[in-house]
């Protein structure tokens, strides 16, 4: 039996195992194009905004 062939899929950078291998081995040359990491203030604001939305959803569900 032969395996069915897939149509050519477009390049997906999230499925690039070479980038993962470079990350796992500590070779960061390929990973320099990512840009700077986000800081703590952005993470805290995102957390507070998410908790606020969760609280609003709980209040709306309790009012139904």
Image: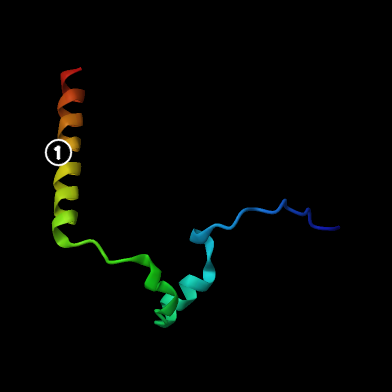
Which residue lies under the disc numbered 1?
Answer: 52
Q: Quadrant of the N terminus?
A: bottom right
Q: Position of residue 42 (x, y in %)?
A: 18, 55
Residue drawn at x 51%, y 60% as measured from the top left = 13
Left or right: residue 64 compared with residue 10: left
At 46% from the left edge and 77% from the top edge, which residue is drawn?
22
The answer to whether residue 56 is above or below residue 29 is above
Quarter assignment of residue 56:
top left
- Work out whether 27 lies above or below 2: below
- In the displayed structure, does residue 36 sit left or right of residue 1? left
User: How many marks are shown on the rendered structure?
Assistant: 1
Q: Which one is nearer the viewer's eye here, 48 or 64? A: 48
Q: Secondary structure at mark 1?
A: helix
Q: Quadrant of residue 24?
A: bottom left
Q: Residue at x 49, y 59 (%)?
A: 14
What's the image's color scheme? rainbow
Instruction: Identify the residue at horizontal 47%, vertical 71% (top origin).
Output: 20
Against 61, is 33 above or below?
A: below
Single out the residue that lies furthest toward the right. Answer: 1
Which quarter of the rendering shows the C terminus?
top left
Task: Looking at this view, name the residue that lies furthest to the top.
Answer: 64
Q: Position of residue 21 (x, y in %)?
A: 48, 76
Q: Residues within 10 Å of mark 1 (few under 14, many from 20)?
A: few
Percent from the top left, x then y, of residue 27?
A: 42, 82
Q: Quadrant of residue 29?
A: bottom left
Direction from residue 31 to residue 64 in the image, left or right? left
Q: Position of residue 9 (x, y in %)?
A: 65, 53
In the image, 44 versus 38, the foreground residue is: 38
């Amino acid at each position: 039996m032969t395996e069915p062939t897939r149509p050519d899929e477009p390049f997906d950078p999230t499925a690039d195992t070479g980038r993962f291998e470079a990350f796992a081995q500590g070779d960061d040359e390929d990973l320099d194009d990512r840009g700077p990491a986000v800081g703590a203030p952005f993470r805290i604001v995102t957390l507070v905004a998410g908790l606020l939305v969760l609280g609003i959803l709980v209040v709306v569900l309790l009012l139904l």
